[in-house]
Image: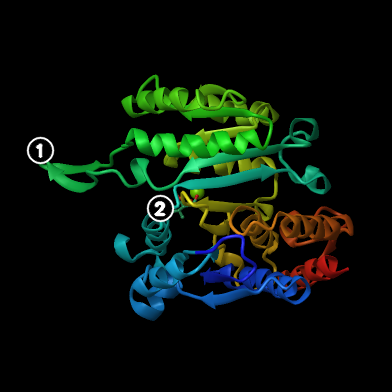
């Protein structure tokens, strides 16, 4: 995979629910970059999640992994929906998502929580607490209790017994630590590691390894919080944080909380990277089956995921910047999808929002 080359092959995985319509808007943006900036991004589409199950009987077809390995980047919509909830666990859409993360070793999950000044009133928190918020959660994505063994439900002492295991090798902790410190170096130089070291041995190891890794980054300041306190601090004073690094499960919980601080989960992109910065990019919101197909979903998180892709995997920071400003321009012009619309706004649908971003990009 030649990264930083303008000719790149991108795997598009629309997935389920609103995934299909929001990805279509991101594709418009990519087409525009191809037309106007000779980006040569070659799109191939694949199946993941419920859509893959319906077509192939598996939420995570071998074919998808095979194609993914030939691509420079992946853009994912969202997976899941009530239609597949009663399936056996191994066939559910989420297995597709967990499978692709694990199979491609996308261990470093970057979830920015940025408050757009135009949307400050959308937050449920007071304006002065959230205005200017720009925080990056770095979540370990392929280990911990999500994947640890043993796991399962069995009969023990004559009753049902459920077990999952929170496990980490020191090498797994160190590599996510390096990701976080390197990101902090490009930001304000502060990393807060979140664990539960007062109770869990695996967290004690986490804390020790973070301390060890931090010795290689004298320009970054490391602090630690227990996860319960971190949750409280996120809501009390979120601007105290620059980069937060944490395990898979804690990161799952804290990143939803951080997203909500911005009041606009429909605006937030994410990246999941391997050790070579090969990545899968997706909006952090889900497949929202209740509003699928109604042309009301917010495509901006997916469009901003394209921007993250350009920045982190394709070495095109300038074009990433262009997309970010185009989104900002459209917000400045007062256009909003329903989820972020205040009182006196111009409410537009999914398609129109996509067109507006392309127009801003090309003007
Ligand atoms: C996320 C989601 C997934 C996770 C689910 C859908 C498996 O909540 O990406 O945060 O728990 O990682
Ligand atoms: Mg989650």
Residue 245 image position (x, y, % from top left):
52, 34
Q: Residue at x 43, y 40 (%)?
A: 249
Q: Quadrant of residue 185?
A: top right
Q: Element at badge 2? A: loop
Residue 104 image position (x, y, % from top left):
41, 58
Q: Which residue is mark 1?
A: 157
Instruction: Kindly tell me whether mark 2's CB lies below 8 Å from ligand 1.
Output: no
Q: Residue at x 82, y 44 (%)?
A: 117
Mark 2 crowd level (few <14, some 14–19, many ≥20, 10 Å Cα): some
Q: Which residue is mark 2?
A: 105
Q: Quadrant of residue 345?
A: bottom right
* Between marks 2 and 1 in the image, the one whose residue lies nearer the viewer: 2
Disc 2 or 1, which lies upstream in sequence? 2
Mark 1 crowd level (few <14, some 14–19, many ≥20, 10 Å Cα): few
- 342 horizontally vs 307: left or right: right
Determine if residue 61 is in view: yes
Mark 2 and mark 1: span between their CA atoms? 38 Å
Image: 222 above or below 167: above
Instruction: Kindly tell me whether mark 1's CB lies below 8 Å from ligand 1.
Output: no
């Amino acid at each position: 995979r030649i990264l930083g080359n303008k000719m790149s092959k991108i795997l598009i995985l629309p997935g389920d629910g609103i995934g299909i319509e929001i990805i279509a808007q991101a594709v418009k943006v990519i087409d525009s970059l191809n037309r106007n900036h000779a980006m040569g991004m070659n799109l191939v589409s694949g199946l993941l999640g419920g859509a893959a199950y319906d077509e192939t009987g598996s939420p995570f077809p071998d074919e998808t992994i095979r194609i993914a390995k030939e691509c420079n980047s992946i853009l994912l919509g969202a997976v899941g929906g009530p239609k597949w909830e009663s399936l056996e666990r191994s066939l559910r859409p989420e297995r597709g998502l967990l499978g692709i993360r694990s199979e491609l070793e996308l261990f470093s999950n970057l979830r920015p929580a940025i408050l757009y000044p135009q949307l400050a009133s959308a937050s449920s928190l007071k304006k002065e607490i959230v205005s200017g918020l720009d925080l990056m959660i770095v979540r370990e994505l392929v280990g911990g209790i999500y994947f640890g063994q043993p796991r399962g439900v069995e009969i023990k002492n004559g009753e049902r017994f459920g077990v999952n295991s929170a496990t980490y090798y020191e090498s797994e902790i160190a590599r996510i630590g390096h990701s976080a410190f390197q990101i902090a170096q490009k930001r304000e130089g502060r990393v807060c590691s979140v664990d539960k070291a007062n109770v869990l041995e695996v967290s004690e190891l986490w804390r020790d390894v973070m301390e060890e890794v931090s010795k290689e980054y004298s320009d970054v300041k490391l602090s630690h919080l227990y996860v319960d306190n971190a949750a409280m601090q996120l809501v009390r004073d979120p601007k105290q944080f620059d980069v937060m690094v944490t395990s898979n499960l804690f990161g799952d919980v804290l990143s939803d909380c951080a997203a909500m601080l911005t009041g606009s989960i429909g605006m937030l992109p994410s990246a999941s990277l391997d050790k070579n910065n090969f990545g899968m990019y997706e909006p952090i919101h889900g497949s929202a089956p209740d509003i699928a197909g109604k042309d009301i979903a917010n495509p901006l998180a997916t469009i901003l995921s394209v921007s993250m892709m350009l920045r982190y995997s394709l070495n095109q920071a300038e074009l990433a910047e262009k997309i970010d400003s185009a989104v900002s321009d459209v917000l400045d012009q007062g256009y909003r999808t329903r989820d972020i619309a205040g009182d006196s706004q111009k409410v537009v649908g999914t398609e129109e929002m996509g067109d507006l971003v392309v127009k801003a990009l090309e003007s």
